[in-house]
Image (tube, grey):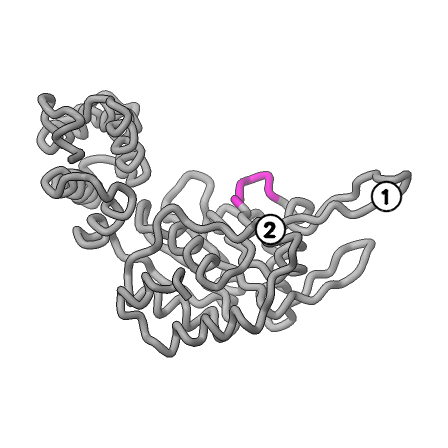
Amino acid sequence: MEDLNFLKEQQVNSELIQGIEEFRKKYSVAEEAANRIIKPAIPFYGKEILEMAIAGLLKGENILLTGAKATGKNILAETLAYIFHRPTYNVSFHVNTGSAELIGTDTFEDNQVKLRRGSIYQCAQYGGFGILDEINMAKNDAVSVLHATLDYRRSIDVPGYHKIDLHPAARFIGTMNYGYAGTKELNEALVSRFLVIDMPAQTADTLEFIIRKSYPNAKPEAVEQFVGLFLDLQLKADNSEISTKALDLRGILAAMGTIQTGLRPLQAVRMGVTNKTFDIFEKEIVDDVVVTRIPESWTRENVYG
């Protein structure tokens, strides 16, 4: 299968790749859910992490991805759903996310009350991969739904309607960052329902892979500077010299996109990185790092061949 070639390029265990191929043959996708199979803009790079996640999912386990900002948790979750060829259902938890949003709510249709199915209900029904983003922001009402869904019961009790069993292909991938406002410690009962992968920080190799996949015509010397910029900011964030607001890989990639349209590189990076922080002193520190890597004299021709 061509869409699994990037796994072979990273020398992912051939038995795991074969397991994915067998999984895809075993579980077809309902036509009404096929439009939820989404190819990620860039695939995840990291052999060891991929092998751990794939092995867990093949054995029917759910995965929890933890770690600092910009470690690729969402990219990995999207990549896993795509390579397993499953429809994706995203749930972004916040203080107002409750059981109604997950299971469904009553709605009036054709002169009768019907259940408007929520994302977790649809994921269970169609054998999707549910991506539970910022799961450590989930309030108790939402967590109570997840308990029976994620453990050996693999079922959802829909109050006032019926109980549904999860499709055998259904899996759940949770993500969580440390220290964000509104987050809390996950209780032991919920954590026990996952295999946990602690995502490592980005390295020069992973960053170069991501940038080259996104912008294959970028000049090697420019890629080196953008990689260096992210690593410099990552080091300063690790040393508590700056917050993680400016540590934004999406921002760097977006900046590189605007450079393609003709914007001067320094202006683009200030939009994508420097201006993500609103503290004037922190902004000065970040901008000093930026101008060291991205000279004011640079034009589009310095970045793209």
Q: What distance separates the C-alpha of mark 1 from that of mark 2?
A: 27 Å
Q: Magenta stretch: give its range.
A: 92-97
Q: Is residue 18 above or below residue 46?
A: below
Q: Amino acid at mark 1?
A: Val
Magenta: main secondary structure: loop
Q: Please say if the residues under marks 1 and 2 sit with CB atoms less than 8 Å apart.
A: no
SS assignment at label 2: helix
Q: Is residue 63 above or below residue 41?
A: below
- Whole-percent x, y for residue 58 in the image: 47, 73
Q: Residues within 10 Å of mark 1 (few under 14, many from 20)?
A: few
Which residue in the structure is indicated by mark 1?
113
Residue 125 falls inside the magenta stretch: no
Q: Where is mark 2, residue-wise?
A: 140
> Residue at image x 58%, y 69%?
27
Quadrant including the C terminus: top left
Q: Which quarter of the rendering shows the N terminus?
A: bottom left
Q: Is residue 281 above or below residue 20?
A: above
Residue appearing at x 71%, y 49% in the figure: 117
Name the side, left or right, on which 130 lies relative to 242: right
Q: Position of residue 244 (x, y in %)?
A: 28, 38
Spot occupied by residue 144 in the image (x, y as percentages of width and height): 63, 56
Judge left or right: residue 125 versus residue 68: right
Q: Is residue 136 left or right of residue 99?
A: left
SS class, disc 1: strand
Amino acid type at mark 2:
Asn
